[in-house]
Image: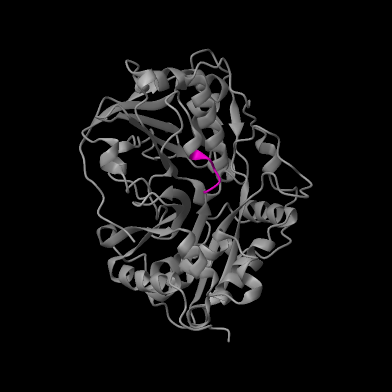
Amino acid sequence: MGSASPVFAVRRGQLELVVPAEPTPRELKPLSDVDDQEGLRFYSSGIHVYRRNGAKDGEDPARVIRDALAKALVFYYPLAGRLREGADRKLAVECTAEGAVFAEADADVRLDDLEGALHPPFPCHEELLCPLQQGSTGSYILDCPLLYIQVTRLKCGGFIFGLRINHTIADAPGVMQFLKALGELARGAAAPSVRPVWARDLLTARSPPCVTHHHPEYDFSTAEIATDKLASVPPKDMVRRPFFFGPKEISALRNHLPAHLRLSSSRFELITAAIWRSRTAALAYDPEDEVRVQFIVNARGRKGSQAPLPPGFYGNAFAFTVALSAAAKLCEQPLGYALELVKKAKAKATDEFMQSAVDYLVSNGRPHFTVARTYIVSDVTRAGFEDVDFGWGEGVYGGPAKGGEGEILGVANYITRAKNGKGEEGIFVAVCLPSYAMERFQMEIDALTHEPVFDPYA
């Protein structure tokens, strides 16, 4: 399903700090109790790719975006601040107006050279993203810039926009809101059409906290991590490979299901169940090992929610839900078994479940989410990253830069939308596994994305 990625050289200029274009409030703004959990204390990254626009010839996209960034930081002024940690590891943004990091660069590649590779893991993605800077304490989280932007010009007149942002500040919908605002300002607007709202107090623990649900998604164990199959694999022995799920592959997956699940299951549920099952088989866990799949449920716009978030909220607004199974049972049962577990886990994500998760985090010292024997997946197919327009039109790709991010490589993946080398629209998942497991994974996925030779439920 994958092919060799093109390799090219990138010449990056000096990093600079872009400060707000106007004076902004100096204040301390606490993060929510969802924002500052241990597992979000890292930088997420994204790539956006744009074609040459003849109407914009003579304009430098780097200058346009840099100027727009200075304007955007007036409205999103916390992004120009720095994180501080207080009592009980509580994080807050000190709004210092120190600025966001910006760099411009040039690459010796044309957009046409990248056709078929516009999906995660993106070619040469580390060269297209600003390097992170350490704070005064040596940390890459505290007292550091929260936002890094790089604009890389291509030989054809197109460009690539690369972003890193501290995940404690915003989730995918929050990043998307900021990027749309940045695009509007780059196109000449005086202000964003959606004004940012902080309101992090809406996602805080009750007083006193009241945990009403079991939360295996936070059963974090250092001992379990130490014995996990992925923990002992050096990064050089990890392989990233994109897997494409178009209409043909989705149809084949459905035909591996019993009749009552074929039409009632979403593409996300199908793909998640298939990858979880195939990944478990490829990593060859012991038969009785408990394996998990964990996915993100968005708290925004939930039907029947008793505590809706206001328009403009750009913080982290989600909960993890988890499905569990013995490894042998997951691999021996047909695909429908894994899918049923995924669907049941999704159904647990009520308002009370989400509030209970926040209370659990505060009661237990803001723990890291579970990563041992766990596959974590985030669906960004509907985020609309490709819709961001800086004046050159919509992007030909917008989404994650890579897959397998996190404390242990290979645990987390994004499900994103893109076109394959044949121009077919579909879903891409950038899977990251040890080299010894990748071929077995490929075989397992191939078996599920081809029509079954017999009905496993007959």
Q: Can residue 12 be seen from the camera position used here?
A: yes
Looking at the image, residue 287 sits to the left or right of residue 78; the answer is left
Q: Nearer the viewer, residue 421 or 370?
A: 421
Residue at 35% across, 52% down: 422
Query: Which of the 4 quarters of the picture holds residue 453?
Result: bottom left
Percent coordinates x, y for residue 68 in the rendering? 46, 20
Residue 164 at x, y percent in the picture: 41, 37
Which of the pair 290/26 is nearer the observer? Answer: 290
* Left or right of residue 431: residue 195: right
Q: Up-down: is 9 above or below 318?
A: above
Q: Confirm whether residue 218 shows in the render.
A: no
- The answer to whether 456 appears left or right of 421 in the picture is right
The image quarter containing residue 169 is top right
Q: Is residue 2 magenta?
A: no
Residue at the spot 36% in from the left edge and 39% down from the top edge: 138
Instruction: Report the span colored magenta.
Output: 381-385
**Residue found at x 31% / y 70%:** 439
On screen, residue 177 above or below 54 = below
Q: Is residue 383 magenta?
A: yes
